[in-house]
Structure formats: C-alpha cells, structure tokens
Image (cartoon, rainbow, N blue to C red):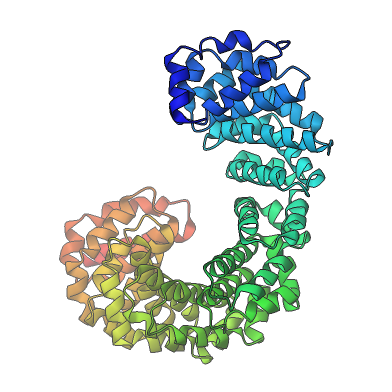
Amino acid sequence: MYAEASEKIQENGILQVFPGLLGPHSSCTPKVANIIAEVAKNEFMRSPCVEAGLIPPLVQLLNCKDQEVLLQTGRALGNICYDSHEGRSAVDHAGGAQIVADHIRLLSQNTDPANQKLLTVFCGMLMNYSNDNDSLQAQLVNMGVIPTLVKLLGVHFQNTPLTEMCLIAFGNLAELESSKEQFASTNIAEELVKLFRKQTEHEKKEMIFEVLAPLAENDTIKLQLVDAGLVECLLDVVGQTVDGDKEEDIAELKTASDLMVLLLLGDESMQKLFDEGKGSVFQRVLSWVPSHNHQLQLAGALAIANFARNDGNCIHMVDTGIVQKLLDLLDRHVEDGNVTVQHAALSALRNLAIPVVNKAKLLSAGVSEEVLKFLKSEMPPVQFKLLGTLRMLIDAQAEAAEQLGKNVKLVERLVEWCEAKDHAGVMGESNRLLSALIRHSKSKDVVRTVIQNGGVKHLATMATSEHMIMQNEALVALGLIAALDLGMAEKDLESATLVQVLHKLLSDERSAPEIKYNSMILICTVMEPLHKEVQGLMFLDVVSKLRSHENKMVAHQASLTEQRLTAQS
C-alpha cells in the first residue's frame, strides 16, 4: 500500500479501530488483516501498529481454522516483525511464534497448493520474527522448529517459494551454535545435497551454499555432508566454472572450493576423503595445485595442509611426490606475491615436515632453499609460516641446522623479526628458530653468526617468556653459546643482564624443574667471566634452598652449583 495512504490511515486514527474488527467470526477479518499486512510494508507504520494494540488480536486469530484468515494474519504479523524490535517483542509477549511453529508442524505433510502458500507465509513470519536476533532464534530452536523445517524441505522440495523460505530460515538459524546439534540429528545433509543437485541457476546454488557453510563448521555435519555426496557436487561445480570468466562462475568456484577445504577440517571427514591416499577426491584436489587458477591453487594447497594432519597421511603424501608440486607452486608466486597462496603452500610444507622420516626427504627436495626465497616478504602471515616450516625442517637435522645457521641473511632477518612487537607470532617464531639453529647444530660457526648479528640479547629476553617451552629452548641455546664461545659472547651476555634473568628464574617458585636445572647449569658456565654480577646477587641463598627440591636432578645440580659458588667466592 502506498506510503501516502498508510499515513492517512494513521492520521485519521483508523489503526485504533482495527482491533475491534479482528474478531474470529467477523466476515471482514481477513480484509482487515490484509490491510494491516499492506500498511506494515512501510517501515514507519510498524511501531504505530504495535501501539494501536493490533498484535494481541492478530495472535488470537492464529487459533482459528479459516485458511484465508490464517494467511492474512501470518502476513500481517510477518510484516510488522520485519526489522522492528517493537513488533518482535509484542509478538513474543503474545506467544505468537509458538502457535505458528505448531501450525507448521501440523501442516507440514499436506501438499495442497493453498496449504503450501500458507506454510510459505508462516515460515516467512518466523524468519522476520527472528532475523539477526540471537535470543529469538534460540527460542525457535528450543521450540523444535529445525526438525519441522527439515521435514518441510523434504516433502515440498518441488515448491520453489517454500523451499527458498526454508533455506533463508536455515541460514538464519545455522549461525547459532546451539542449533548445530539439532541440525545434526536430522537428515538436513541429505535434503540439501538432493536440492543442490537439482539447481541450475546461480542464485539458487548460492542460497544453498549460504546454509551449507555455517552447518559445515560442525564436525558431525561435515561427515554427514560427505556421506550424502556433497563433495562430488562441489567437484562438479569446480569443473563447470574453472574456465569461466563470468562473475557468477568466479563466485561459485570460490564458494565450492572453500567449502571443500572446510569439509577437510573435520578429522573423520578428512580421513574418509583421503582413503589411504587412494581416494578419488584426494586425487582430484591434488590436480588443483598446478592449475592456472589462483583460487584453485589456494584451495589445493589448503586441502593438502588439511590432509597433512597426521603422520601416516604426511608420509604417504611425501612418498607420492607432493612436495615438488608445492615447490613449483611457490616458485610461481615468488615474484607476484600472492600472499594467500604463499601462506597456504608454506602451511602445507610445514605440516608435511612434522614426521621425523619426512625431514631429510624435504631437505633433499630443496624445500629450505625454496622457503628462503620468501625471506624478503613483508607480509607477517607469510613470515610466520616460513619460520615455522624452517623450524620443523631442522628439528634433529644437524647438518641442515648448521647450513641455515651460517646463512648470514637468514640470521639477520631473524634478529630483525625478533623485534616485531606488532606481530607476536612472528616475534615468537623468530626467537624459536634462532634458538633451534643453535640447539640442533651445536656448531661454533652458527653460534658466532648469531653473536655477530646481535642475537644473544633476544635469546636472553626469550628466557623470560611466559611459555615454559620457550624459556627452556632459550636456556639450552644460551648454554651452548656459553660453552662453545664464551669469550666472544661475554659482552653480549653481560649487557643482556643474563645473570639477573637467571636469578629471577631460580627465585621464582613457579619456574618448572627443567628451567631451574638449566639455569643452574648456565650459571656454572658463565660464573668466571661474570663473577661480579653473580656475587652481587646473593646466588648462594637461592641455590642452597634448592638442595631440598623435590626433583632429584634439581636438588643434585643445586649441590654442585653451591660448591662452585662457594669455591668462586
């Protein structure tokens, strides 16, 4: 109804007359409800409709049997609720949602066209009632609306307006965490895949995608979607759109490949699709990596990273030559700097490098050389993955650790990133890699490279980290520096206030036994050159208390350290 006519109805006080005309037995009731529905299409009329007291009589009409009355009443309530807090509150207060939900449940099996129209209106009303409102959505979930709507989708899949209304309602409810369990207990996966297979239009596919994406965040539903055959549908979409240059092709390709990667985040669904490396899906996804399409390259690399979440899969993939595909992909993106593809390929290599048996294979395939090409990257996500990949590669690989540790450009960059205060992840990984180069190589040349490039102070700071694993890695690396070239490191250890750091770690009751143990080992190593600092801090008091420590290794080392301190003084 035109805004002008609506204004006149409001100005002349006609809204206030309507409640009296909405009797269940009055012949004009459906017409009045229809007028209210039309008036409420105007945003400025929704609050006046509530203030005129229209909601209670409209909700009462939901109890009558006349189909036309129910249809117009559902429309009126739905329009008043649209984007209106007052409308929703009034319907909530009058208990309208429960009555409508009960109607839908009772009518769900009836495929008569007039009934389908009524169901479409009622679904729309519940959608307008709960849209973008978590507490009202939760209320609908608690009323058991989800199983009813899933049943509707199955029974009325040939009725386009009704299925669309169900899909929009699912889209609203699926974002809610509490809804996922209810969805998982229905056959929603089967129904959505069945519906998806029938679609030819882009818009319809997009509508289903919008429901699938939030649902697929749930691991149980991931597996149900895989079992229902969604993956084959997604692979078909990719095949149909990969060479398309229309906007909708590009959008569909992205959505389908993203959803594919999401399905692989569930352990069970991932393992099912991997199928010991024989799975046809796994093979198809591998073929995306050398693709000319950036979106597919990205999805392929992310999929490999997801498949590489357990040792068995990683070992199989490395043995079947996946590393070279990833290296070729990275090589294509050294210059153009496609950050998402770089990040995804590095993530995959990092995961593949975790099993011990894979490390030497990745090193001999030239992974470290390829990864070093990205040292010049200024993008923190790429820096973070690059560091993690190198750290995984050199774990217990002395030769590789020595080779990388003597690489001045790498060590310079690590020292620079150790100060990346804006990017805690990059800063933490840089420190850990610096320490790992020393710990795994145990090489004097590496120690000298780290000292000459100013790395000592960062390792001393790392020893004060809130993470015990990082404290320990730092102490072991500092111990090796002191043992292998104390003369060269002495000044740096002094200016990094190492002795004060160690005193603090030994005095702190929260320090783990291995932290106390390694701190005492280090004190014994630096005691002579830094004796002034050691004597000034009353170490004897702290150490003698540790002789009665419950950990035998700590207690024994405390006795030895006490003897050394006493002899020194």
Q: Is residue 11 visible?
A: yes
Q: Is residue 209 above or below residue 106?
A: below
Which corner quadrant holds the C terminus? bottom left
Foreground residue, 511 or 254?
254
Foreground residue, 252 or 176?
252
Residue shown at 42% from the left, 76% from the top: 338
Q: Is residue 95 visible?
A: no
The percent position of residue 274, horizontal first and vertical second, equals 71, 72
The percent position of residue 374, horizontal first and vertical second, equals 38, 81
The percent position of residue 537, horizontal first and vertical second, equals 20, 56
Q: Is residue 510 left or right of residue 284?
A: left
Q: Is residue 178 above or below residue 52?
A: below
Residue shown at 40% from the left, 57% from the top: 467
Q: Is residue 489 left or right of residue 88?
A: left
Which residue is outermost to the top? Answer: 20
For residue 66, what is the image quadrant? top right
Report how many numbered discs are placed on residues in the image.
0
